[in-house]
Image (cartoon, rainbow, N blue to C red):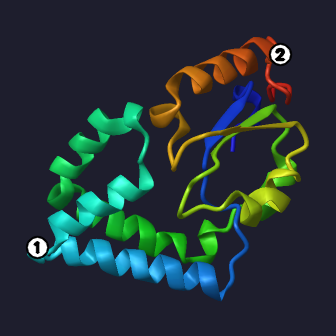
């Protein structure tokens, strides 16, 4: 909305770039139902939530953050249910906006993400006019699971940014 204020954009395993098909919709509904069960206080949810996060954030460097997330299972379940419900709406499809992003974009992708698959998002990623794609040996959150590699990539990207935003400020 205000491109004149943006020098660069960093996206880590972003949603909204996958094609909206039956598979994506079914996955979103399934996940929304899973987290809705937790929001209702279903007895089995904390254990299943812990397994899910072990699957999504398997890297050893993410262990402390994973433990904090798992400890807050019942608290975050309603937020996650709402998020996954929103992912299946037409407004969640951001692909049409991609070519209009004028600033440099760093897309940091965890190669082993079991939910967001790079191959399903690659076409949209390639449509950013000024994109750098970096992949990491991680499950979903490269900044948690491969922090040193992510930090080095982020530093390179930040150093490469222009001093001014890509779009001049409006008068």
Image quadrant in which you'd find residue 37: bottom left
Q: Is residue 140 left or right of residue 31?
A: right
User: For numbered disc 1, what is the local secondary structure?
Assistant: loop
Residue 6 sits above or below residue 88 on the image: above
Q: Which residue is mark 2?
A: 162
Q: Could you tell me which residue is drawn at 64 percent across and 49 percent down? A: 111
Q: Position of residue 5 (x, y in %)?
A: 70, 27
Image quadrant in which you'd find residue 2: top right
Q: Position of residue 143 (x, y in %)?
A: 51, 32
Residue 58 sits above or below residue 95 on the image: above
Residue 145 sits above or below residue 28 on the image: above
Q: Which residue is mark 1?
A: 41
Image quadrant in which you'd find residue 107: top right
- For discs 2 and 1, the disc positioned in front in the rendered view: 1
Name the foreground residue: 15 vs 44: 44
Q: Position of residue 51 (x, y in %)?
A: 29, 61
Badge 1 crowding class, 10 Å Cα cut-off, few under 14, some 14 to 19, many 20 or more, is: few
Badge 2 crowding class, 10 Å Cα cut-off, few under 14, some 14 to 19, many 20 or more, is: few
Q: Could you tell me which residue is drawn at 83 percent across and 15 percent down? A: 162
Count the numbered circles shown.
Answer: 2
Residue 64 sits above or below residue 24 on the image: above
Q: Position of residue 9 (x, y in %)?
A: 69, 34
């Amino acid at each position: 909305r205000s491109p004149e204020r943006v020098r660069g954009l960093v996206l880590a395993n972003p949603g909204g770039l996958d094609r909206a098909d039956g598979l994506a919709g079914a996955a979103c509904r399934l996940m929304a139902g899973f987290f809705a069960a937790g929001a209702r206080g279903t007895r089995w949810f904390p254990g299943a939530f812990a397994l899910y996060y072990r699957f999504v954030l398997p890297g050893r460097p993410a262990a402390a953050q994973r433990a904090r997330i798992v400890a807050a299972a019942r608290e975050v379940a309603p937020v996650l249910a709402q998020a996954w419900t929103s992912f299946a709406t037409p407004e969640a499809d951001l692909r049409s906006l991609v070519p209009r992003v004028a600033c440099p974009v760093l897309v940091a992708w965890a190669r082993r993400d079991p939910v967001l698959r790079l191959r399903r998002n690659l076409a949209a990623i390639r449509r950013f006019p000024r994109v750098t794609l970096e992949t990491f040996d991680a499950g979903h959150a490269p900044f948690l699971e491969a922090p040193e590699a992510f930090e080095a990539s982020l530093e390179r990207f930040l150093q490469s940014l222009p001093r001014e935003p890509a779009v001049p400020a409006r008068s």
